[in-house]
Structure formats: C-alpha cells, structure tokens
Amino acid sequence: MVTNDQSIEVRLQPQSTRDIEHFVDTICDQLFINDAYYGNILISVTTFFEELLRYPGNNHVVITYHTDHQKVSISFNPVDNQLIKTFEESMENVKNTGNEVDKLGFLLGTLVDHIEFDDRDKVTLEFDISALHNKVFQHRQTQLNSYFNHTIEEQLKKSDDQL
C-alpha cells in the first residue's frame, strides 16, 4: 500500500544527495512509475536540491511527497526566500542562459508539470502521472476483456452451443 505524505529531513550538504535519490526510488517503486517519469522526477528533485546547497541560511530541508495517483507532489521546506524570488523571476521568462538559476528554471520548466511557491519558504514540484495510470488501466481492461471473451467462447464450445 502506498503511504502518502512521506517526508525525509536532510542536511544541506552534498552527501545528502544519496538520501534524496533513495527517497525518489522508494516513491517511484511504490507507485510503479516507469523509467521516463522516474528520470524526470529524479533529475528535477536532485537538481533543485543542488541549487539549495548554493544558498546558505538553513542547514536542513524537509522533502515531502504526496500523491492522489493523478499527480505526484514533492515539496521542499524551508527554501531560502532569495532563491524563491530569483527562481520565480527566472520561471516567468524561461530560457537557457549562462545564469545558473535560469538554467534551473529552464530544466525544471521542461521536466516538471507545475511548480508552486507557497508560504514564501516552500517550493512544490508537481508531476502529472495520470497518463501512466490511464495506460496501465487500459492495458488491464484489455486483458480482462480478452480473458472473459475467451472464457465465454470456451464455455460455448464445451456446451456445443453457437454464439
């Protein structure tokens, strides 16, 4: 069973990247997220964390995950207000320039479906996984229909009936 609102608190130090990677691995395994979505989530989360390392102020960050099986939301709290302000400005005019924050904005604007800035110290990255689950649902529905059609045909053959 998938547990929502899982959190991890990590120190803002480069070695914590492994903890974050493990956290993302766990989320994606629990939700059966395929490699393409997994790559987007992992790159986005680790890249944002690496940007947090550049802004001193806090010595830790809490990363929280939540899903409704339509989207996955991963929040970082607290985030330095200066980073949020700079990042919001770069998101308004997303382009790939030499500026590190603009690169981050361009990358996250490409990989993340929605970015939300809350309470002036929290950033949430949202990933739409509904297509993934719809595809799985459609595949299972097709298999189930095939099974029932086959079962009905077999029963009719045994009874020597006509369909």
Image (spheres, grey):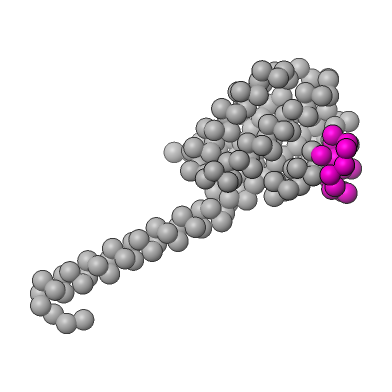
Q: Quadrant of the C terminus?
A: bottom left
State the image quarter where residue 98 is shown: top right
Residue drawn at x 84%, y 48% is 94
Residue 30: horizontal and vertical position, in percent?
48, 38
Q: Residue furthest bottom?
A: 162
Residue drawn at x 65%, y 24% is 17
State the image quarter where residue 18 is shown: top right
Residue 63 falls left or right of residue 155: right
Of 71 and 90, which appears nearest the observer? 90
Specify the segment rendered in magenta: 89-103
Q: Residue furthest front?
A: 98
Residue 54: horizontal and vertical position, in percent?
82, 24
Q: Is residue 110 visible?
A: yes
Residue 93 falls left or right of residue 70: right
Q: Quadrant of the N terminus?
A: top left
Of 157 and 116, which appears nearest the observer? 157
Q: Is 96 within the magenta? A: yes
Residue drawn at x 42%, y 59% is 139
Q: Is residue 116 visible?
A: no
Of 108 and 6, which appears nearest the observer? 108
